[in-house]
Amino acid sequence: MTGRRFIITEVSLRDGLQELDGFVPTAEKAECVRRFASAGLAEIEVTSFVRPDRVPQLADAAALSALVDPVAHPGYSALVLNAKGLERALAAGYRAVALAVSASEVHSNDNLGRSVREATGAARAMVASAKAAGVRVRAGISMAFGCPVEGEVPVGRVETLVRALAAEGADEISLADTVGLATPADVLERVAAAAAVTGRAPALHLHDRPGGILDNVAAAVDAGVTHFDCSLTGIGGCPFSPVAVGNLATETLVEALGPEATGLDPAAIAEAAAFFSRVIARAEPISAERA
C-alpha cells in the first residue's frame, strides 16, 4: 500500500471480551492466544488487571497469564489502570504493559474514578515504575477524538496529555477514538499534534464508524501512523461509555493494507477470526463469584 510495514496489536481478548455479557473459560482464552500467535499476530493484549466486580469477564487475568507465559513472549501485554494492576502484571511476568488516561472528565471519572488531572498524575507514576522495572510501556489517551457526553475534546488537551506521558519515558503513545467519533480530518489533526510533541506518529486505537472506518485508516496512513490496535471480528467497546461501538476489525485492516505491508496472511487471520467467533458463541453466563 505504501511500502511501509505496519504493526497490529490484537486487542480482542481484552477490549473485545470486556463487552460480552458472558464469560469465556480461561483455557479457551489461552487457546485463542495460541491460535492468534500462530496466525502471525505477535503483538497481543492478553488481558487487563482490573477489579473483577467492574469487569468480571477479565477476572481470570492472573490464571490466563500463567497459561500463556508472557515471560517467554515479549509481544504479549496487559492493560493496567492503577498501581495495583501494574504490580499484578509485573508479578505475572509481563514485559510490556499498556495504560490509559482519558481526555474526557466524565469518562475519566466513570472509567478510572479520578479526574483527568488525578489520573494523569497516577499514570505518570506508573510509567516511571514500569520503566524502572525494565518494562515497555504504551500509554493510551482515551476519548482523544471527542466524548459523547462532553462533546469536542480540545486538541490542546490531547497535546498536554501526550507531553505528560512522554516526559516520563513512555515508549509509545496511542490515541483512542473510543466511541467512533473521529473523522479523517480529526485523525490528521490529532496525529500531527501528537507527533509534534514526540517526534513520531502515535499508534491509533480506532473504533468503528459505520461507512467511514477505512477512511480514518487511510488518513492515519497518510499522517504516518504505522501501528494500529485491532480486534478479530471487530468485537469490543468501552463498558463505561453510554455509546459503545466495535473495534476496527483485524481482518478488515489486513485486507486493506495487504499481506506485504502487515506480514500477515489474510486466510490465516480469517481462520483465527472464525475460531474466535465460535469461542464467543460459547461464552458462559457470569457466575455470582465473578460478578
Image (spheres, rainbow, N blue to C red):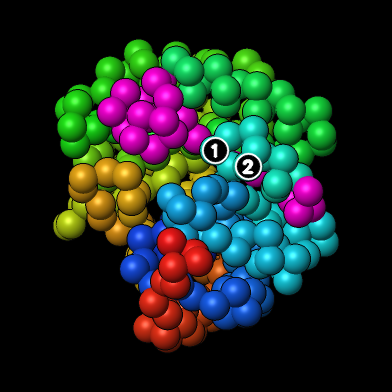
Residue position marked by numbered label 1 in the rendering: 81
Q: Position of residue 26 (x, y in %)?
A: 60, 74
Q: Position of residue 114 (x, y in %)?
A: 42, 25
Q: Residues within 10 Å of mark 2 (few under 14, many from 20)?
A: some
Task: Give me the residue at 70% from left, 46% from top.
Answer: 88
- Label 2: element kind: helix
Image-based side of 131 in relation to 42, left or right: right
Q: Give amino acid for label 1.
A: Leu
Does the rendering let one see residue 190? no
Q: Position of residue 30 (x, y in %)?
A: 64, 74
Q: Which contiguous range is marked in magenta?
A: 91-116
As drawn, the label of residue 97 is none
Q: Residues within 10 Å of mark 1 (few under 14, many from 20)?
A: many
Task: Give me the residue at 56% from left, 52% from top.
Answer: 48
**What is the quadrant of residue 231 in the picture?**
bottom left
- Label 1: element kind: loop
User: Where, quadrant-wise, is the C terminus in this rendering?
Assistant: bottom left
Q: Is residue 233 above or below residue 142?
A: below
As drawn, the label of residue 85 is 2
> Which residue of the protein is positioned furthest toward the front in this rendering?
288
State the count of labels: 2
Distance in Å between CA atoms under marks 2 and 1:
6 Å
Image-based side of 33 in relation to 21, left or right: right
Label 2 close to label 1 by CB (< 8 Å):
yes
